[in-house]
Amino acid sequence: MAGCRPRLRVGPRALPYPDAVLLAYCHSTSGGWSTVENLDHLSDLRVEEGILLWAEADVRDLSEEDVALIADEFSLHRLAVEDATETKQRPKLDPYEAQLFVVFHELNEIGRQLEPVQISCFVGERYVLTLHEGAQRMLDEAKRRWAVCQEELGQGPAFLLYTLLDVIVDDYERIADELEEEIENLEAIALDAPRTPIQQDLYSVKQRVARLRRYAVPVSRILEWVRDSADRTGFPEESRPLFRDVYDHLMRITDQVRSIDDLSGAVIDLQRAEQAHQLSEVNKKLTAWAAIIATPTFIASVYGMNFALEPDTGTAFGFWFALVLMAAAAIVLYVYFRRRRWL
């Protein structure tokens, strides 16, 4: 299978710009994989029976002239080219007359956040062209899986697109499993040690779940387009079970994302309830101590007023009587609040 993953930097005769890079993979039913020497051969390969062409390019390495040349070579629709080069698109599938345009995203965790990397696929009759923005991790895995499983999957653009989507959805599933494990750990911490500060971790999980939902859930519409149609040119009947399997995995991820979101919300509510409980305990203690201090203060203020007051105003007995009364009132209140568990 070593010959199944050739790479080629297209020479200056085909692309006369030094930064233009195109990786091309050509597979024939009789000869297996082979390299593509220059773009002049691509037109012939795309119309030759028994040939499947897979080409890819990083849009960051392409100038406007390079993009125009590739678009002309593959007869790409102008609107699709704009969406492929302006890499801020949502996951979608747009059918055009000459090709199918599909957009999905690789998600990379950077600084505890998920950052999307767009992958745009042009699926033609005998070719798949992939324009991306540095999504080499997913493409390398797709090449590895295609090289291993191509004989089982079949030969055609539909099976190649399935491989790409299968790799992407598997990666989404890995991210969802990691998020689920992380939120379960945070839930255990919140239950065992409610005062542990986990707010930043919770926010990180919520952010990643939101990003995963934004880019994973819309992929289901791409799979539904293939799954629910009785007649899709270029998608043979034997490819439908494969896309249905990917769809089932994506539905599991959708349910998992909803569960993680609900659980993270429950943990946040638990944290808020614990904070409210702590505030209530503080208020109880403040109220109790205020009452304990206020009662002797009240007695002292009454005995300090400038009019005759029993018992024995102006004598030492009255002074000590007031002190004992204040101490007794404070002790009684302290015992009462202790029994109420306010102190």
Image (cartoon, rainbow, N blue to C red):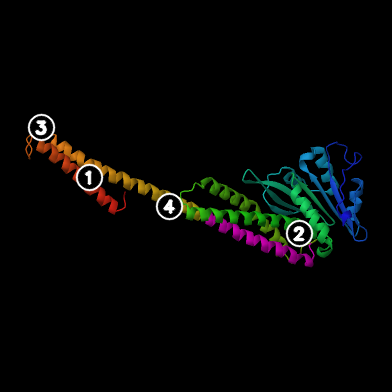
Instruction: Indicate whether 324 appears above or below 305.
Output: below
Quadrant for the N terminus, please.
bottom right
* Residue 273 tag number: 4
Q: CA distance from mark 2 to mark 3?
A: 96 Å
Q: Residue at x 81, y 50 (%)?
A: 129
Instruction: Indicate whether 245 appears above or below 339.
Output: below
Name which residue type carries label 2: Tyr
Is residue 309 covered in magenta? Answer: no
Residue where numbered disc 2 is placed: 162
Q: CA distance from mark 3 to mark 1?
A: 25 Å
Element marked by disc 1: helix
The mark lying in front, picked from 1 and 2, is 1
Residue where numbered disc 1 is placed: 330
Comes first in the chain, label 3 or label 1: 3
The mark lying in front, picked from 2 and 3, is 3
Q: Residue at x 63, y 52 (%)?
A: 212
Depth order, front residue of 182/262? 182
Comes first in the chain, label 2 or label 3: 2
User: Could you say where residue 106 lies in the image, as x and y percent from the top left?
Assistant: 70, 50
Q: Residues within 10 Å of mark 3 (few under 14, many from 20)?
A: few
Residue 11 figure quarter: top right
* For residue 6, side relative to residue 276 (left or right): right
Name which residue type carries label 1: Ala
Is residue 244 covered in magenta? Answer: yes
**Is any atom of residue 56 visible in this view?**
yes
Q: Residue at x 70, y 60 (%)?
A: 223
Comes first in the chain, label 3 or label 4: 4
Residue where numbered disc 3 is placed: 306
Comes first in the chain, label 4 or label 1: 4
**Is any atom of residue 96 visible in this view?**
no
